[in-house]
Amino acid sequence: MARPLCLVGSLAIAFAVQAAEPVEALTAHPLGAKSQWDYRVDEGGRLWLAYYDANRRLRLRYPDGREQSFQPEERGQAPSGLGLEAMGGGVDLLWRDKMPKKGLYLVDSTLPDMSPLEIGAGTEPLARIRAEADGAGLLHLLWYGEETGEPTGSPYNLYHRTWHRSSESLSPTELVMPGIYPSMVTDETGGVMVFSWLRDASPKRIVARYRPASGGGEADQAGFGPAVTISEIATIAPLLESFRSGSRWFVLWVGQSGEERADYRLEGAYSDDTGKSWTRFGFEGLEAMSIASLQRAADGSGHIILAISALERKDGVKSKRDVFLLRSEDNGTTWSKPEPLRRPAPADAGATTDGSVDLRAFHAKDPSVAFGSEPGQVVVVWEDWRNIRGSLYASLSKDYGRTWAASNVRLPVDPGKNFGMDGKLNGIYKDGSHFAVLAGRYENDTLSTRQIVRVGLSWPELADYTEPEPADLPTKAERVEAVRKRAQAFWTAVMNDDYKDAYALQDPFFRARMSMRDYLTKTGMIKYESAKIDSIDINGARAELQVKLRASIPSYKLPTTGEVVSKPEKEVTVSSVWLWVDGDWYKEFRIESKDIVFTVY
């Protein structure tokens, strides 16, 4: 089995892939860059996937690879929203549509002759949809709608129904509470806990209601017990996550405060009595960070891991996203401080020490996390742009994330392609004794369309394997000389008005979006007389050059006004960024006046 190598500091970490073809394309039609998708694994371990393609048509991929579309190709009106849940040997799919009439529609894959069933009549449903099976064989459906005149007095309310597969029937629609962020968790008895943020209440607050499997007790006629306030909070980000760990119920949210609501705080609460009372908690060390995504894993034995991507907020500094873990070993009673999955060198190390890279210069985001089949096994996978192209990186632990048997391992990817995770779903799952990672593979450097792919990883061969760094890797001095030659070739081409050669030295993300023909029509107004490279600062795959230029603008007439414009010769020093991608150095195209680039690292 092949063992691709990935350089991490002064070590090369190797890992094994599950199959000869490490990347398996799953979707038959391309998705847009932001198209919604989701997946489930049924009780037989089979993968189901639902997605909106680039033309906004909803498709369901079966485990055997065939796909079903739920809208005619010629239809103009697109559906929206997506709820997917596995039950037994199949899945149930839920979406919002306006045809044949506005509503929520449900299909069950185990009922091949079933026509889409409208379930949201009288609620004016919107696109935030949840579907979750319980331990009693029922599918719980939750959504929010904008039906006017509801007794809550709120313009937005949450509604609940259950789907009974065995009898092919639905329970009556239940108005649960006002709110705009529907979230729910079920238990093995058939109970369900619903959460929401009451935006239009006074005071604004996060509330939960529990519905036992058989009603009774304090439950009202709909089966839901009284609403319990968890936290009074004026504003939250659109992230309200709920889950169970053992018999403990959890809800997490990101509160916003301060001027322009720019101060973010990840908080949570848990209940040990099915929502009658709640204990709030916070997370130390995240006060200066904006949370961009959150995924979690719980093993049911008290170990919980949260994987987050966050952006550190500093005045006047354009920070990059990074990835962190928070761990609990006592079922959420206490939590570790955020631990970075990438461990950057000191800020000046990338410029002064061979082999070291300050990773804070490159985005990392949207981590996913899963426990393995053996106690203590944990794998985390994230999207990483340290190589200028988007790559998938993984870290693997045998002791619940306290230490890492393999750290910052680059997963096998197709050369010249960009890969990315989706921050809205947990893209890794246990596949027998292996792990499977689901990610997006972009079709080209415009990053506008992608396929969903699967990468299989074998745990036994992932543990703690290192090899010495190959002796033939270029030294820092050699890298400096290589980028100097490429930069000098670029400026020589520009001084000779050879803009075809200059175009070929621009970064591939720019060239994917602008043709050579368009580039040639927009260049040549400035006449460069000389170019001298004063300094080169290399940090991994990025080099920043200071270049002293002598240039002028010969007289020319503006096409819009007819005004004649010219500038005398002048000497200036400019900063120029070069990127190591596709085996060579390329100049990062930048419109300085508007701070526009086409790269996304």
Image: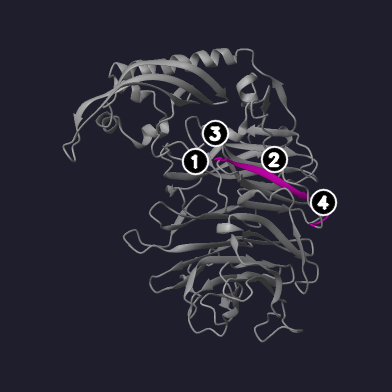
**Residue at 69%, 71% in the rendered image:** 193
Q: In this view of the protein, can residue 68 be seen by the observer? A: yes
Contact flag, marks 3 and 2 (Cβ < 8 Å) = no
Magenta region includes residue 321: yes
According to the picture, the residue beneath numbered tag 1 turns out to be 441
How far is disc 1 from disc 2 in space, using C-alphas? 25 Å
Q: Amino acid at mark 1?
A: Arg
Contact flag, marks 4 and 1 (Cβ < 8 Å) = no
Contact flag, marks 3 and 1 (Cβ < 8 Å) = yes
Check disc 1 and report its element: helix, strand or loop. strand
Q: Residue 470 placed where, x, y %?
A: 64, 16
Numbered disc in front, either 2 or 4: 2
Contact flag, marks 2 and 4 (Cβ < 8 Å) = no
Q: Amino acid at mark 3?
A: Val
Indicate which disc, 4 or 1, sits on the residue closer to the N terminus.
Answer: 4
Magenta region includes residue 325: yes
Does residue 225 lie above or below 91 as drawn?
Answer: below
Give whichever of 18, 581 is nearer the camera.
581
Indicate which disc, 2 or 4, sits on the residue closer to the N terminus.
Answer: 4
Q: Residue 94 placed where, x, y %?
A: 52, 66
Range shown magenta: 317-332
According to the picture, the residue beneath numbered tag 4 turns out to be 329
Q: Amino acid at mark 2?
A: Pro
According to the picture, the residue beneath numbered tag 3 turns out to be 413
Does residue 490 lie above or below 188 as drawn?
Answer: above
According to the picture, the residue beneath numbered tag 2 turns out to be 340
Give whichever of 344, 104 is nearer the camera.
344
Q: Residue 349 placed where, x, y %?
A: 65, 24
